[in-house]
Amino acid sequence: MNNFNELNSFDDRDEIVIIGMVGRFPGANNIDKFWQNLRDAVESTTRFTDEELVSAGIDLAVLRDPNYVKAGSVLEDIDLFDASFFGFTPREAEITDPQHRLFLESAWEALENAGYNSETYTGRIGLYAGVAFSSYFFTNLYPNRDLTQLVDDFQTFIGNDKDHLPTQTSYKLNLTGPSVNVQTTCSTSLVAVHLACQSLLNGESDIALAGGVSIQIPQKAGYLYQEGGINSPDGHCRAFDANAQGTVFGDGLGIVVLKRLADALADGDYIHAVIKGSAINNDGSLKVGYTAPSVDGQREVILEALALAGVEPETISYIETHGTGTPLGDPIEIAALTQAFRRSSDKKGFCAIGSVKTNVGHLNTAAGVTGLIKTVQALKNKQIPPSLHFQQPNPQIDFANSPFYVNTKLTEWKTNGIPRRAGVSSFGVGGTNAHVVLEEAPVVETRDLASLQSRPWQLLVLSAKTETALQTATATLASHLQHHPQLNLADVAYTLQVGRRSFDYRRIVVCHSLEDALKVLTDQDPQRVFTHQHKPGQCPVVFMFSGQGSQYVNMGRQLYEVEPTFRQHVDDCSQILKPHLGVDIRNILYPTAQQSEQASQQLQQTAITQSALFVIEYALAQLWMSWGVLPTAMIGHSIGEYVAATIAGVFSTEDALAVVAARGKLMQQLPTGSMLAIGVGENKCSLC
């Protein structure tokens, strides 16, 4: 397994990429704020006052215990949930564990972050996730029998039991791939990532969500410190430090959206990072006890992940460790890492390590994905954030003779020509270990936006289930554009159109640049912002095609220049018409400045006029249909009748063009005629 060269035959079909991420962490309600806190060395644990603890139901006698630690890591706004959005009644929402509620909301956000609408996506979307036990049920529901007696027991079970987290989410979001509950305690969410990768590689899923959530109720509650236990005596986690005595537990949630690398590249997805390889295993029984970690188990899972990734340990420059800050766990973890790396490298001190638990505490079932998201953010920003509270190394750890050092300050992540790579570890009580090998996103050949042809005006579409939510969505989009000025407006417009579901309250914004979009979204100029409440029901569309007399030089020229669908149909029709007309009609439709007058004269000749009108009207109809605007009926006047018949399938395009060209030639040979049009009301049409 340690012969990495033999495994370099693995290609990008065996690699998975992260195309979307969401997270809610102590002190950070999104991954951008999370990264800012990590970068700025913020410790996001909270110190609780006696008043807060008493209010949460903590007994005064417990508070007076000198071993009671009044600290924890909490999430904000766990009581908030958009029940009606997901089809919950108020009562159903009330009996549903906040872990389930927040995970459902975050899964929705994760798909939007990746740019996919699960209602319209034609592939299979899988979900692998885990959740901590429901303290909400035991502290809020079970004592409140008046409430639980008002609802069905099975509904309460669904809303609180671990088993139903992924399947309830799949049901609400219409995810048709595998939906699997993962439970390996602390390593749950990273094991979920591994299983999701396997699902993608074996073809069960085309997109997969993976993650975990842990929220304990009441949130504002400390813990009793016990010497030799996993909890810290002072509410700080000092991973790998000589004074490390444990960790502090907290609440958090993280989800990543995964896809096969080749598919992501083909679909133009935004790639946050590449998962080169991953592995899971179990310690078995050859260790001190069931809850103890194992050098052998951790070493083997790291070796397997490296082997499957096909990379040498020397190319790994950062490890996000499990790093609980326990006197037993930290030395075992570094020993296992060192043994794995020493299989092929004798170099010392080349790989940084850190632990996100020093920032936010141990997030239980969400711990692994939290470390993963931290590391992906570090890869994206090419910076390694500091691991906190490290001053002197644990005397049981020989860092000097290992490949590792604890990174204690924000550091530029340098590289020597190879892609930046990192490992992420997560080890569960009971011995299920997981390790993931990450690589920074590939450098995809970017388009020259200055020369890229795109329509000069873009349509930004927004929708929501309520007027208030629509206003919030508008403000959110404006804020996003303001904080990401490098975005391509055409890409933003595309994602909003195809990567979002459509709801009844709708708004469209017409704009020509990112700056213009921001101004219009902020000012909401009624000439540029159109808001409408869509009423359920059908709205049939009729295509009307005009006759001769509406032609002019350069009609549809801008469409020809910026709309590939329109251009393709004009080109195809022009090629078909060449042998019938003896000219390339594009030279008449879109002449040079010098040929404009001659082309205008040619376009007045019926033999040319009718073919030109057919081409433009036919291409324009095809463009509308490519956008999803499909006619239920069509009507045409004169040459327009032929276009309508062709779209309806009466003629093939080739036959229609041959008939139109012949018709134009025959009509040109007739004496000059004229036409009379009379405006008559509907009630007098019978007189005509």
Image: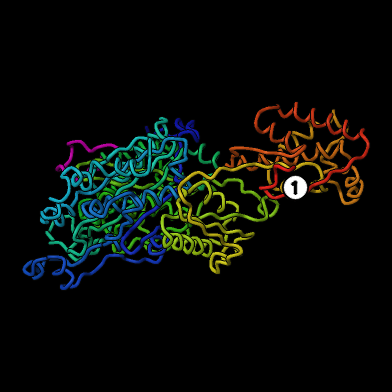
- Quadrant position of the N terminus in the picture: top left
Q: Secondary structure at mark 1?
A: loop
**Is residue 518 or residue 527 the one in the foreground?**
527
Asked whether 62 or 540 is in front, the reply is: 540
Q: Position of residue 619 (x, y in %)?
A: 71, 39
Quadrant location of the C terminus in the rendered image: top right
The answer, for residue 371, to whether it is visible in the render is no
Pick the front one: 46 or 234? 46
The secondary structure that most of the magenta stretch takes on is loop
> What residue is rendered at 56% in x and 42% in y?
540
Q: Is residue 652 above or below residue 534?
A: above
Q: Please say whether residue 108 is one of the residues in the magenta stretch.
A: no
Q: Position of residue 671 (x, y in %)?
A: 93, 36
Q: Is residue 101 above or below residue 345?
A: below
Q: What span is in magenta?
A: 280-296
Residue position marked by numbered label 1 in the rendering: 556
Residue at image position (52%, 37%) is 262
Q: Is residue 188 visible?
A: yes
Q: Residue furthest left?
A: 61
Say left or right for 18 vs 105. Answer: right
494 up-or-down from 307: above or below:
below
